[in-house]
Image: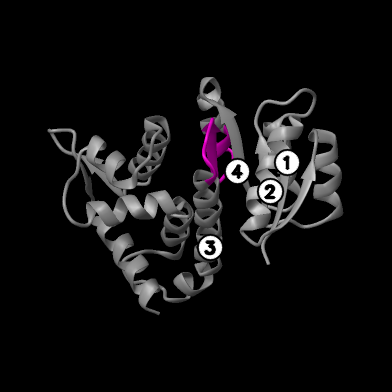
Amino acid sequence: MTNILVVDDEPRMLQGLSRILIKEGYSVETAGNGNEAIEEIYRKNFDIVVTDLKMPGINGMEILKKVKMKSPETSVVMITGFGSIQNAVEAMRQGASDYITKPFNPDKLRNCIRDVIKEKKFMRSKGRILESRHEKFSPEDLDKIIKSLSYLTRRRILNILSLGPSSFTNILNTLKIDDPTKLSFHLRVLKQSKLVNQDEEKKYFLTSKGKNAFEIIEQLKEA
């Protein structure tokens, strides 16, 4: 069973989040502030931590740092207001798996947690990918590619681009992402990893490296 810690200083939000996740069959514990959260993190191992970004005292960013220091494999999801999206993106740069902007419906939280669980499953396959010693990549390059594709959204982007070049708007609509900033972040990482590039019309396409990476992902699905 997936163990989740929910952290929020607003009691109603804390109860609402935990109720949604408990109904999904997850094991859920709660913390009403950053101090309580850190106590829980050092008391028990969690698969996922869902935390509000802005809280008095110890905030979500500090919780993220503590989680990654104590248990790097634990995934962190940020809950944030629309005005704090840039801070949420910075949290993803520092290792958060995703963020959800308020207000949101229960389905968005459910889908986010399911995606994070899929990401964790993908990363558990890392050993199998490295053992394959794919002839088109050195072990070092392959390790970097796996890290850059640890996010499910990035693998979905590669899947879209495997069908041909696509515009930002088309990718956004296909993935049903309501936050363009989030998609921009993922595309920027893929470009920096040289898996994706843009043509003269600003459409995104898979580079030869990206095509090879996509092939590896597809082979992993079949294994």
**Residue 112 location in percent, x, y?**
52, 49
Cα distance, mark 2 to mark 3?
Answer: 28 Å
Cα distance, mark 4 to mark 3?
Answer: 17 Å
Q: Nearer the viewer, mark 2 or mark 4?
A: 2
Q: Earlier in the sequence, mark 2 or mark 4?
A: 2
Q: What is the three-letter code of the residue carrying label 1?
A: Gln
| Disc 2 secondary structure class | helix
Q: Earlier in the sequence, mark 1 or mark 3?
A: 1
Cα distance, mark 1 to mark 3?
Answer: 31 Å
Is residue 30 in sight in this rendering? Answer: yes
Q: What is the three-letter code of the residue carrying label 2?
A: Arg
In screen coordinates, is 104 left or right of 174?
right
Q: Quadrant of residue 56?
A: top right
Tell me the residue that label 2 is attached to.
Answer: 19
Q: Nearer the viewer, mark 2 or mark 3?
A: 2
Magenta region = 91-106
Q: Do the numbered discs 1 and 4 sit on residues whose CB atoms are within 8 Å?
A: no
Q: Earlier in the sequence, mark 1 or mark 4?
A: 1
Q: Is residue 105 magenta?
A: yes
| Disc 4 secondary structure class | strand
Cα distance, mark 1 to mark 4?
Answer: 17 Å
What is the crowding at mark 3: few (fewer than 14 residues within 10 Å), some, or many (at least 20)?
some
Q: Earlier in the sequence, mark 4 or mark 3?
A: 4
Quarter placement of the C terminus = bottom left
Cα distance, mark 2 to mark 4?
Answer: 17 Å
Tell me the residue that label 1 is attached to.
Answer: 15
Q: Nearer the viewer, mark 1 or mark 3?
A: 1
Q: Do the numbered discs 1 and 2 sit on residues whose CB atoms are within 8 Å?
A: yes
Q: What is the three-letter code of the residue carrying label 4?
A: Val
Residue at image x 66%, y 43%? Answer: 17
Residue 77 disc label: 4
